[in-house]
Amino acid sequence: MRGDGDGWVECAQGHRHWGRFGAAGLLLQRPHHPDRTTLEVLLQHRATWSHHGDTWGLLGGARHSDESHVAAALREAAEEGGLDPAAVRVHGQYDDAHGAWSYVTILGGTDRQTEVRPTGGESIDVEWVPVEEVTGRPLHPGFARTWPLLRRGLRPLRVVVDAANVVGSRPDGWWRDRAGAARRLLQSVETRAAAGLGGGDLPAGLDLLPLTRRWPSWVVVVEGAARTAADQLLDGVEVRVAHGSGDDAVVEAVRDAAAGPVLAVTADRALAARCGALGATVVGPRWLTPLLGEG
Ligand SMILES: [Zn+2]
């Protein structure tokens, strides 16, 4: 599909780039082994005639003026790699700004069933490449430059919320209707999950690749009288009902985060210590509440 973004521009650093409104590409990962310990990423072998032809890089291309960077990256991946956009879970955006032009990398994940194939005229091939083998290929120079950084951001951030503790931190009469208070919390987390987090929204002490925006996977643990709040369907938020100890359910959600970074939200000191021992960064409800528009 041709769009109004097709065309060459010169950036402030004096390079020639494709994409009048900038370009976007998809850095997609999936587990390399069934045990999920390592990752592989989807790379495109670029057509010989293309700019920096016969190199390996990301599926991507010029952004149209009327589409988001996420939409542009997913559209290009569908056009050139036969990738179903619905199979991608986007979790981050990284801007490589050159002044007057930028290349935006969209980071996402998928599972091992996702099918890809070279489509369109710009791909010789598309291939899943183990992370450790990426630099063994002749890489597109733009991708080669950002890859050492981007590989640190391949796994999504998981935010685990101790709902009872967050709800209990606000003297708003929650004790009169625990399920209602939990339901309101879940709805505001759903809104925030869709909006994502900007770089300045993350707490200090979380040592992560500085992304322009990230869309963490959210897990909210509800327990006790609040558990009926879990009957609603939410977008982008996993609700876990603690049948035994709520603390154990929070610890479990931290433990099964598949080696990605975890932020646990609780002010319970014993629980914070257990999460911290598993490598999670722990913050109190005072970090989360303002982000939910309830500060
Ligand atoms: Zn440039």
Image (spheres, rainbow, N blue to C red):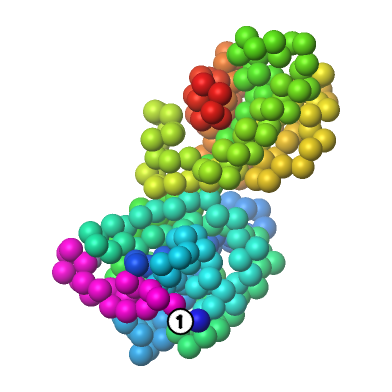
Q: Is residue 114 above or below residue 253?
A: below
- The residue sitting at 72% across, 24% down in the picture is 182
Quarter of the figure with residue 64: bottom left
Q: Which residues are magenta?
A: 3-20
- Residue 267 % position (x, y): 57, 16
Please name the amino acid that badge 1 sits on: Arg
Mark 1 crowd level (few <14, some 14–19, many ≥20, 10 Å Cα):
few
Spot occupied by residue 143 in the image (x, y as percentages of width and height): 35, 66
* Relative to 64, residue 109 above or below: above
Q: Secondary structure at mark 1?
A: loop
- Residue at x-position 46% and y-position 81%: 2
The x and y percentages for residue 17 are: 28, 73
Task: Give me the residue at 28% from left, 57% from top.
Answer: 97
* Residue at numbered disc 1: 2
Magenta segment main secondary structure: loop
Residue 47, above or below 292: below
The answer to whether one can see residue 103 in this image is yes
Figure label count: 1
**Looking at the rendering, which quadrant does residue 134 occupy?**
bottom left
- The answer to whether residue 180 is left or right of residue 126 is right
Classify residue 129 as left or right of residue 9. right
Q: Is residue 99 magenta?
A: no
Vertical comparison of 180 with 69: above or below: above
Left or right side of 18 for 222? right
For the question of whether residue 56 can be seen, the reply is no
